[in-house]
Amino acid sequence: MTFTIAHLGPAGTYAEQAASAYAQWWSDRTQQELPALAPFPSIAQTLYEVAEGRIEVAVVPVENSIEGSVTTTLDTLWQLETLQIRQALVLPIVHVLVAGAEALKAIQTVYSHPQALGQCQQWLHQNLPHAQLIPTHSTTEALKYVETDGSTAAIASERAAHLYGLPIFAKSIQDYADNCTRFLAVSQPQSSVSVPEISAAPVYTSLAFSLPQNAPGALVAQLQVFAARGINLSRIESRPTKRSLGEYVFFIDAEASLETDAMQSAVDLLDRSAERLKVLGSYSTIKILPTDLP
């Protein structure tokens, strides 16, 4: 079957690269036609398109190795009832400075997505300490602000710079060489799009829950459910419920499949004790190599 993958656009974003890599991976393993890609102006919008049934799959960033979680993704997954994680993808992120300047001192303003600005903050402090940093909705959107006079610059992917015919002033400007972002492929639970199996790949289960009351030991009691069953938690973090100051939603990634007895037992117990529990999905992780990128 053919289907469409939503991603943060416009063309040239890292989200588009991740969506394209996932489309190719899916097509290769199912021997079916390559899925179409559909760009949208925000991460939240891509998820709403899937939740409301207009698009089959969305590929969205959830965590960066330098800047941490993409909170918009976490908040929207919690808010929308009908979304499930199907797959995770780890994408290498290499930033370039796009500018027509002849020297760094000519650059007065740098545009990019907040995550990209954060991932390059040390480089920017050392090389452009007086430049004004302005956030944009995506790294590709930042390119439209690059002026020919050299006073403005953008941080984006090398592919995006080539795609729009803009000059690259400096390459690999991220603060850490092993910079990568984890993306999630998300669909509705009843989606007819198949999920190819990966033999011997570790499987993770992502959960989100809120507590019935903010009391000493309340969170520890929930986490002990997993410890007692020998289930390792590879990630745990909190986000505000947006109802009241001091109330939080907790997101965890457990290193176990939902199909195992231990994980199912833990989820059943957590469901009885949490105020609200959402099982976001069980999935394996694909590591995308630079040679796999478009």
Image (cartoon, helix red, strand yellow):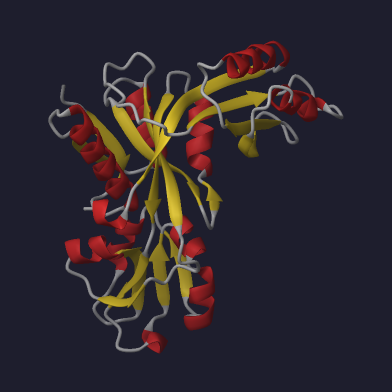
Q: Left or right: where does residue 127 sit relative to residue 276?
A: left
Check the picture and name the quadrant holding the N terminus.
Answer: top left
- Residue at 33%, 33% (x, y): give it: 58
Residue 230, quarter of picture: top right
Outermost residue toward the left? 33
**Residue 8, located in which quarter of the rendered image?**
top left
Q: Where is residue 293 in the image (x, y as percent from the top left)?
A: 25, 53
Q: In the image, 218: left or right of 47? A: right
Q: Can residue 9 be seen in this view?
A: no
Up/down of 211 relative to 111, above or below: above
Numbered circles on residues, count: 0
Q: Can residue 99 be seen by looking at this rendering?
A: yes
Residue 146 in the figure: left or right of residue 270: left
Residue that appears at 25% across and 51% down:
292
Residue 279 percent location from the top left of the image:
54, 21
Write down the quadrant of residue 86 in the picture: top left
x and y percentages locating residue 265 in the rendered image: 64, 13
User: Toward the viewer: 85 or 153?
Assistant: 85
Q: In the rendered view, would you say 234 is above or below 4?
A: below
- Residue that protrudes farthest toward the front in the picture: 200
The residue positioned farthest toward the right in the image shown: 216
Residue 138, compared with residue 250, is above or below; it is below
x then y, percent, for residue 14: 33, 52
